[in-house]
Image: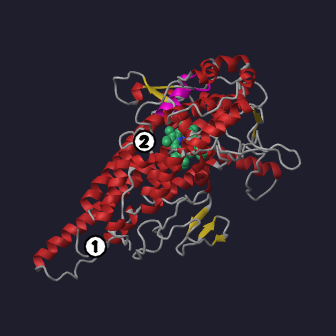
Amino acid sequence: MAPNRIVPIMSESTFNLPRLEDYDISPLSGFLPSTPPLQRLTNPYYEPWETLIDIFHELMLIGRLREYVKKLPILKTDRLETKGEYRRAFLVLSFLAHGYVWGKYEPISDRLPANIAIPWVKVSDYLDVAPICNHAAVVTWNWRLLFSNEPFDLNNLATLITFSNTLDESWFYLVTTAIEGFSGRALTGIMTAIQAVYDGNDEQLINALKVISSTIFDINATLQRMFEKCDPYVFYWKVRPYLSGWKNEDLLPQGLIYEGVDEDDENGNPTYRQYIGGSAGQSALIQALDIALNIEHYPTGVRPNANGHTSSENGHFYKNSCHHYSSCLNGYSQKHEIHHYATNGHTKPQQPYLHSIRQNIPGNHRKFLEDLAKIANIRNYIISNANYDSSTNTSLSDEDEDAKLLRETKEASDLVKAYNECLIQMKNFRNKHLQIVSVYIVIQSHKRVGGLHFNAKEGTPTVNKDLIDNSEAITVAISKKAITNATTKNGDKVIRKATSTESIEIIKGTGGTNLMPFLKQMRDETVAQEITENAE
Ligand code: HEM
């Protein structure tokens, strides 16, 4: 370590790198369980749930799932013994619940019978996660190895449960599972990098950053494979509706009644609960990468400025204490002030959607993200040391000093490069993801023929390469057309924002996000963290 290096103020003796295992994270499989999820609850007591899942698709098809769910006994959860059993129960109950609520070619139900609601809430409480179908259910706990003697790999994975019984839905989950499979490598790289910062070990930090960037590169290559076997039509019309939740959801505006769980209010009205549905946006892996790389996200349309304030696109300023949107060192202004390396205990992401979906991330993984935010220090360390002046050290001869300066400059430069490479890969992830969202959601949503998603009867369009390559341009063209139409129709010269009834103009994400602006801002905020050498 260079003698005049700026080191974290947290002394090494007080710094204990958290152990991944303490958060139910495996250094190898990361957020995925270290052994494949249970494929069945073997205690005969739970056979009624498993039997219903065995014939889930058949019951959905003939429209009798609700009848059979209502016949279920209300099973107690105290016979579940292991965490694996609780996860399997959560998976089964999530599919039964969402199948019940959204149905197939039948009216949507705004109440969930006690037979499912009571145990689902109990199991969720145990796992410390909201009782709603989430990323953990459909991805993290929903896979098996096709050949148990072969390693974990996209080419050796199968899903346990799907809504639509289609290969496309399986592929959607499995590509995402394969991406989560990189979390062991990513998290090991992150922890090594953080330790390197506390040790002031630049070489180790550079190597760890290289591990992180190469992992994101592999994630991106896997993400691209979504196009291979998941048809956008099937995804949008046949799968996505079942993943919907009951918060900011037009079809269930009040939410859902979990019968037998909550009491009626003082006027005898039932209590509705609202939760955001399942989305890969709930991936703890991508959130961990953002936190580790100090990529800050703000509410859509809000941007930070040099004074630590944020401003919205309409010109309104939001003065934030550091406990809201901006961290004390977000790199926009305070270059040399290194009062803290960690993010001062900021434990919540600044973007409201990212904040609210934390309740869909299982408790131990959510806690890990919170603790990671307290020690994430890589970017500030690099900024603080990228330009340090070593000329104060007079004990060396001129020649030695030149050599040392050269080495340190190169080290600093390599650090910046290694960090920026991680950002480039994160940007690539978000660009690729934007393409996917264009093809799988934006373009599909313009094929609306009226009625509910479930009732769409169009032919399946093929995915051609041009469509994928030009997906962002197509999206822009579509949204421009929508705005022009709205403007012309009303003879209104001011381009205005669409209201919620004009769903063609604002396409919402699972959590009610204004999809494309939200995702593009996430991408731009990634790029904004790039460190430019000698920028201080
Ligand atoms: C067909 C494939 C996919 C579609 C249609 C899709 C759609 C979406 C949508 C609509 C959102 C906005 C937030 C929400 O409403 O949930 C979102 C966010 C997000 N998705 Fe996906 N997604 C897909 C695949 C994936 C995969 C495989 C990953 C990998 C983990 C992923 C990671 C994320 C992340 C991290 C966000 C939060 C925004 C960000 O960090 O940039 N998505 N996605």
Residue placed under numbered mark 1 in the picture:
5
As drawn, is 244 to the left or to the right of 179?
Answer: right
Q: Is residue 6 left or right of residue 445?
A: left
Q: Is residue 281 magenta?
A: no
> What amino acid type should be assigned to the residue bearing mark 2?
Asn
Q: Nearer the viewer, residue 69 or 509?
A: 69
Disc 1 or disc 2, which is closer to the eye? 1
Q: Is residue 168 above or below residue 395?
A: above
Look at mark 2 in the image and give the residue it sits on. 220
Location of residue 24 in the rendering, given as x and y in whole percent from the top left corner:
44, 44
Q: Which residues are magenta?
A: 162-175
* Magenta region includes residue 169: yes
Task: Categorize mark 1 by other alpha carbons within 10 Å: few (<14), some (14-19), many (20+).
Answer: some
The image shows a total of numbered marks equal to: 2
Q: Earlier in the sequence, mark 1 or mark 2?
A: 1
Q: Can you name the residue that lies furthest to the right here?
A: 267
Q: Nearer the viewer, residue 37 or 395?
A: 37
Q: In the image, 455: left or right of 459? A: right
Q: Please, what is the three-letter code of the amino acid marked with disc 1?
A: Arg
Q: CA distance from mark 1 to mark 2?
A: 35 Å
